[in-house]
Amino acid sequence: LELEQTRASAQMVVKSQLRDFVMAAFLPMFFAVVESAPTATEGEPEESLDEDTSKFQRATTCLVIISVLMVISISWEHMQEYLDEASGPEFQPVLGALFEELTLTGFLGLTMTAIQNTDIMEELSDYFFGEETVVEELYERIHVTIFGVTVSYLTVVVCIMFMAKRERLRMVHAEGACSENAEKVVREYYEWKKDLVEKRAWQTPWPLYPMDNRQYDYHWLIMRQRFFKVVQQKDIKHSIDRDTFDLAEYFSQYMILALEKIISIGMRTWLTVWLMCTIFYGLFMGVSADVFSWIVMIFGWVA
């Protein structure tokens, strides 16, 4: 207990010192940005703006931009905390993999922004195209596309994670029901099925008629019996006790590992993306625009 209290006190001291450092470094930066901001709009002479008015506009604009960025940052922090609490400790590896990919995307954006603030893009554009803005405009389009893919990726991952959590809860419920009273699970399933036949509810399309808990528990019971049958056939029953083995936890661990591998984007995936970009580059240069559009549509449909 004393060790935990010491660690907590040390963390509070570090956080307080970092907060003081941020405040001490941020306030001079704010006034430096205000003083270095342009005092006139494009095409207007600087004398057309009153000095006090120009100072007020610059300071107010900077304050509004900083406020918006802080609101976004605070919202993102709250969203992270919500995801941590809503997902539970078992999905922490999945969240870790997700935040790693977002960190990589942020690092790429920071690197490209730093390059954009130099004269490299203008020099390359002037050398290859004879204009200074072509490369920068192409970069902006690619950057917006990557941002859209990142937002889509984040949305899909969060949706899959919550679907996996719901599936895990159903597996835990089914495992408990099958372990306590398998006969009751079978009896409730056939009663439910009989009720469906009488009401002709089986004619309803599946997407509009999700799997009932009794149906899910019954299918889980069948799968559980087949699982232990395979265990018995493989002669590995010495390592698995049928009475105490938690099949739901077993499948949950595999599901979380699979999600973590799906979310993590490794070097192989990046090389595959680069290879596909190279292939489409060759197709784009070798065929007409109409044929290329059809190829992209067919590839997207097949993928």
Image: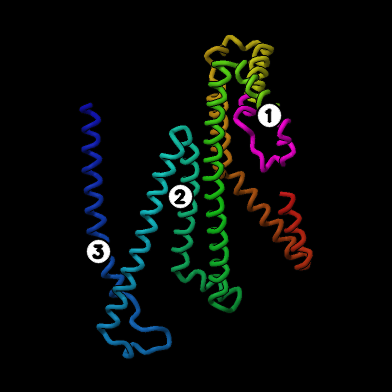
SS label for mark 1: helix
> Which image quarter: residue 4?
top left
SS label for mark 2: helix
The spot of residue 1 in percent (x, y) is 23, 26
Residue at screen point 61% across, 11% down: 237
Look at discs 1 and 3 and give the one toward the viewer: 1
Which of disc 3 and disc 2 is earlier in sequence?
A: 3
> Which image quarter: residue 81?
top left
The spot of residue 162 in percent (x, y) is 52, 40
Q: Is residue 170 magenta?
A: no
The 10 Å Cα crowd at callout 1, few under 14, some 14 to 19, many 20 or more, is few
Residue at screen point 41% across, 46% down: 80
**Residue 27 numbered tag:** 3
Marks 2 and 3 sit apart, C-alpha to C-alpha, by 26 Å
Q: Is residue 222 visible?
A: yes
Residue on which the image places disc 1: 195
Magenta extent: 195-218
Q: Main secondary structure of the magenta part?
A: helix
